[in-house]
Amino acid sequence: MTKKPSFNKKIRTPIPKLRKVLAELQQEINSLCPLCFSEEVGVFELHHIDENPAHNEKNNLLLVCPTCHAKIDKKIVSMEMVRNAKTMALNRNSQIEFVSAIIDEEQCRWYQKNERCFYKGEPGKPEIPVIGFTLINHSPKTVVMKTIRMFAKHLPSGLSGIPHASALKSAVKYRLCITKLGEKLYPLRSPLQIPAGLAAKFDTEIYCKMVGDLDIAPVGRYVLYLSFYFNGNNILTAPPVFLNCSGENEPLMIMRNIG
């Protein structure tokens, strides 16, 4: 009998420069558990947000106290709560607020199923997804967004109370190409200015390249982690965006031919 491959087996891999990573993660949370604000940092434990012990990118790691870590393992604390804690830790010193990320169904064939979860729909409109981001500048001065950083994670695929961002008109559209998995920086030719105390909306087209330099929509399931870089060393990290999936741990459906 042929043994069927396991798609859910978790393989732990070592983290390069672990001490440096732990020091950076401790600074990120200001030496407080991001879930219960415990100060016993000496006993904090490392948690993989997507529960994949081989995914050691820093945006997937969070230091938490042992009590909260146990609650996460027992599903008392949801993955969404952990993601929100990570985002808040990253944005602790930022004066820019993330408001929303929505799909522009007028410009593309994609639709929104859950918050920040977008799926490719039926033909009839352009296939490349257009995602609109709305931010608010809480600083006393105009800020200028100069760069976008996007980390793309490709997931395995089988066969086969916030202000509504649509009330704002997008100021500009940026095209972000997934040329490789991992992190990539996109310097902006048209930097976005957000006056003090005001909100701004901008669109992003997320696409891939085929042989022959043809632009196509992302094929398969992706998780996108985006950060926006402003003047004055101000950085805003958005919650993850999901394409053709609702989360990192969404069950993988395998279609098999019958007969």
Image: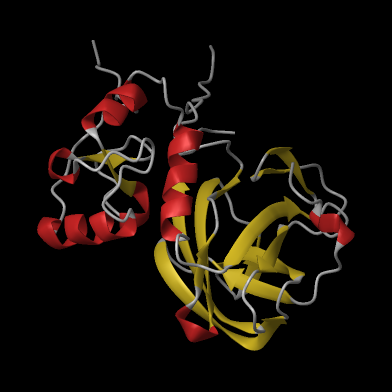
The quadrant holding residue 24 is bottom left
- The spot of residue 94 in percent (x, y) is 50, 67
Q: Tell me where residue 237 appears, x and y as whole percent.
A: 50, 61
Q: Quadrant of the N terminus?
A: top left
Callout count = 0
The residue sitting at 39% across, 37% down in the picture is 35
Relative image position of residue 144 (x, y in whole percent) = 62, 84
- The colour scheme used here is secondary structure
Left or right placement of residue 241 versus residue 184 in this view: right
Residue 25 falls in image quadrant = bottom left
- Left or right: 193 with respect to 230? right
Quarter occupied by residue 48: top left
**Residue 10 in the figure: left or right of residue 71:** left
| Residue 155 in view of the camera | no
Q: Nearer the viewer, residue 244 or 71?
A: 71
Q: Horizontally, is 240 left or right of 181 in the view? A: right
Query: Is residue 247 visible to us here?
Result: yes
**Is residue 152 depicted above or below 194 in this figure?**
above
> What's the residue at 55%, 46% (across, down)?
220
Residue drawn at point x = 81 percent, y = 70 percent? 170
Q: Residue at x 35, y 49 (%)?
A: 60
Could you tell me residue 182's position as x and y percent? Answer: 39, 62
Residue 48 versus residue 250: which sits nearer the camera? 48
